[in-house]
Image (spheres, rainbow, N blue to C red):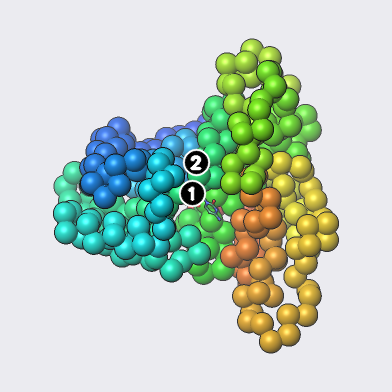
Amino acid sequence: MHPGVLHRRFLNDLSSSLFSFVLPLLPTNEELTVKEEVRGLIEKLIKTIEPSARLLSFGSSCNSFGLRNSDMDLVVLIDDPSAGIEPSHFVAMMGDLLERETNFDVKPLPKARIPILKLTLAPSPALPFGIACDIGIENRLAIENTRLLLTYATIDPARVRTLVLFLKVWAKRRRINSPYRGTLSSYGFTLMVLYFLVHVKQPPVLPNLQRIAPITPLSEEQVMLEGRNVYFFDDVETLRQEWSSINYEPVGELLIDFFRFFSHDFQFNNSVLSLRAGQLTKESKGWVNDIDVGGLNEMARDRNRLCIEDPFEVTYNVARTVTKDGLYTIRGEFMRATRILTQRPDRAVLALAELCR
Ligand code: CTP
Ligand code: MG
């Protein structure tokens, strides 16, 4: 058979294998129901401290990139400004309350950069993996970036969700998804995929939602949040009617291209990935890592090895946790993945299994 035909067949095979790979890893309805009940219960308790407080989910429980048994990300929003709540104090109060009133194991971290409360619940028959949940305070930007990710997923769920979910599983299995150990958060990997689909692929698979003008002019307040421009085009219905990609590559092909691009083409040393603005230079952002930090610790020097601009908090490098070694490992994994997917064009299922070993 002609090599081109064989290759086409492999790509189609790879795409359907990706769908089958991801499907059983999605959360069950039962899990989602239990988690929603837990959220409701904690919210009720928190309202006894501050009646205007609401507890919202963000992150993978509501950006459509959730995997089975993933952690819950929750945030307390206090709607009454006259309540005068100080976040670290509120975290401590919530900690005491939940310790008293629930079976959760409670660990307040009031002094963290963003004060949070860590809750864990031991496994039970209804929840064989227990529950782990972080509760933050007043992190309204997180709600907005969750909505941005969800809107991107909604435009082309079959390809976008499959790619991101697979990448997350792959990164976890290959142990490069540990921000506390020098590698990258799921949020960082998700931004890399979206950047690739918006700015690298030609024709693009996704539009740049932060650059589509609003249909009706918005007021200043509608766009600004905590001093950040959080505007993006979120009218999914209009998008569906008026925007469609002319890129029809199967998801398997996009995956290979993704690995190839980050193995060979992206200039990690001097470039910044910006979902908002495309490729930027580290210099233009002042994110250079070779500055002489003198007596400062290793962490400071390592902060800008990999640079991923947050879509709204544009001075924030989402990948600041990635160390020199971490980046070396991540790039090594991109190369390994490219090799496996391009040099073993036999059975796609086997290639995926090997990839995630
Ligand atoms: N977040 C952030 N900055 C980071 C990491 C995370 O603002 N450096 C916020 C984002 O709002 C993100 C949320 O925290 O959506 C959750 O991040 P993360 O846990 O990395 O992603 P999940 O999609 O929840 O993935 P997982 O299923 O692995 O928990
Ligand atoms: Mg999470």
Residue at x 40%, y 62% (from the top left corner): 88
Q: In the picture shown, does residue 196 fall above or below 318?
A: above
Evaluate whether residue 120 shows in this view. yes
Mark 2 element type: helix
The residue at the far front in this view is: 82
Residue 22's disc number: none
- Is 145 positioned to the left or the right of 265 in the image? left
| Residue that numbered label 1 is attached to | 139
**Number of marks present in the image shown:** 2
The verdict on label 1 being within 8 Å of ligand 1 is yes
Residue at x 74%, y 32% (from the top left corner): 211
| Depth check, front residue: 333 or 241 | 241
Q: In the picture shown, does residue 336 fall above or below 61?
A: below
Q: Are marks 1 and 2 in contact (CB under 8 Å)?
A: yes
The verdict on label 2 being within 8 Å of ligand 1 is yes
| Residue that numbered label 2 is attached to | 143
